[in-house]
Image (cartoon, helix red, strand yellow):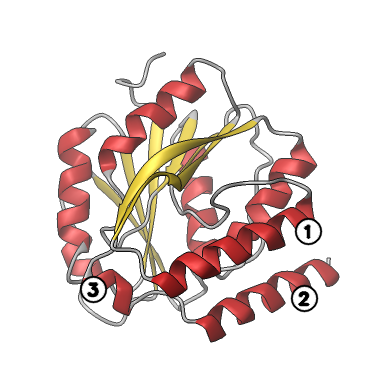
């Protein structure tokens, strides 16, 4: 089956993105009308849910805020129930370019990899703040240290996963440490991985909602603690 069929699920974790989510979903639906758009609202306190109620969207809700990792896992499980072969993870804040999805899915269809990881440093990162760029470089060293896998961009939210081949792919880190956990899953399941260029545009809106240095340190600690408790 090729990518114009109903075997692709795009999972979008959603939390307090009322200003942009409707536009993000409309653009995705316009470009990929045959893909399953699976939005997982993670206890938003604004009008995000109402704005996400548009045609062609499967809307799931967490009654309380569990974290982006938990929202992704809920969406992945639902994609399996829908019979999706591939899952794309896509951020709700408008930073990602939907056009990049085509290359990611084609890579999986051609059996070039089991998981495709987006890299803004192989593509473009428009208006990226210096501090954000520095933190991302530090995080890839941390990822290499903990997993032995060297990536140019270890914290990118745009990915495509062959869940038909790897139904045991499961995220257990509920919050932002899930990005590092996914690299560990790749190593544990011996998944063939490849990075592909993607384009990220940092708007004033997305920059204001970005991770601070303090939050990034918390994410690293969260990842270590989560692994120690397994």
Q: Position of residue 127 (x, y in %)?
A: 28, 63
Mark 3 Cα-neighbour bin, 10 Å: few <14, some 14–19, many ≥20:
few
Mark 2 against mark 1, which lies toward the viewer? Answer: 1
| Quarter of the image with the N terminus in it | top left
Is 107 left, or right, of 229 in this rendering? left
Q: Residue at label 3?
A: 205
What whole-number distance in Å separates the C-alpha atoms at marks 2 and 1? 13 Å
Asked where in the image residue 146 lies, by quadrant, the reply is: bottom right
SS of the residue under disc 2: helix
Is 134 left, or right, of 181 in this rendering? left
**Which residue is pictured at 25% across the width and 68% down the height?**
49
Q: Position of residue 19 (x, y in %)?
A: 17, 71
Q: Residue at label 2?
A: 225
Q: Which residue is nearer to you in this view: 54 or 14?
A: 14
For the question of whether residue 55 can be seen, the reply is no
What whole-number distance in Å separates the C-alpha atoms at marks 3 and 1? 32 Å
Residue 146: which disc? Answer: 1
Is 223 left, or right, of 57 in this rendering? right
38 to 222, vertically: above or below = above
Q: Earlier in the sequence, mark 2 or mark 3?
A: 3
167 to 150, vertically: above or below = above
Q: Earlier in the sequence, mark 3 or mark 1?
A: 1
Q: Position of residue 151 (x, y in %)?
A: 62, 46
């Amino acid at each position: 089956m090729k990518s114009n069929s109903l075997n692709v699920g795009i999972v979008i974790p959603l939390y307090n993105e009322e200003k942009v989510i409707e536009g993000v979903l409309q653009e995705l639906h316009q470009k990929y009308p045959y893909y399953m758009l699976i939005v997982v609202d993670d206890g938003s306190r604004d009008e995000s849910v109402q704005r996400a109620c548009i045609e062609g969207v499967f809307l799931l809700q967490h009654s309380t805020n569990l974290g982006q990792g938990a929202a992704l896992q809920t969406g992945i499980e639902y994609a399996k129930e829908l019979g999706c072969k591939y899952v794309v993870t896509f951020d709700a804040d408008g930073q990602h370019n939907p056009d990049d999805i085509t290359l990611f899915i084609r890579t999986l269809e051609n059996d070039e990899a089991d998981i495709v990881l987006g890299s803004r440093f192989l593509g473009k990162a428009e208006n990226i703040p210096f501090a954000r760029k520095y933190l991302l470089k530090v995080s890839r060293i941390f990822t290499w240290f903990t997993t032995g896998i060297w990536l140019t961009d270890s914290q990118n939210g745009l990915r495509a996963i062959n869940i038909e081949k790897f139904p045991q792919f499961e995220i257990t880190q509920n919050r932002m440490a899930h990005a590092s956990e996914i690299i560990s899953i790749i190593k544990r399941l011996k998944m063939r991985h490849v990075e592909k260029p993607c384009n990220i545009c940092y708007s004033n809106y997305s920059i204001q909602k970005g991770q601070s240095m303090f939050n990034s340190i918390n994410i690293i600690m969260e990842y270590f603690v989560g692994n120690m408790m397994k």
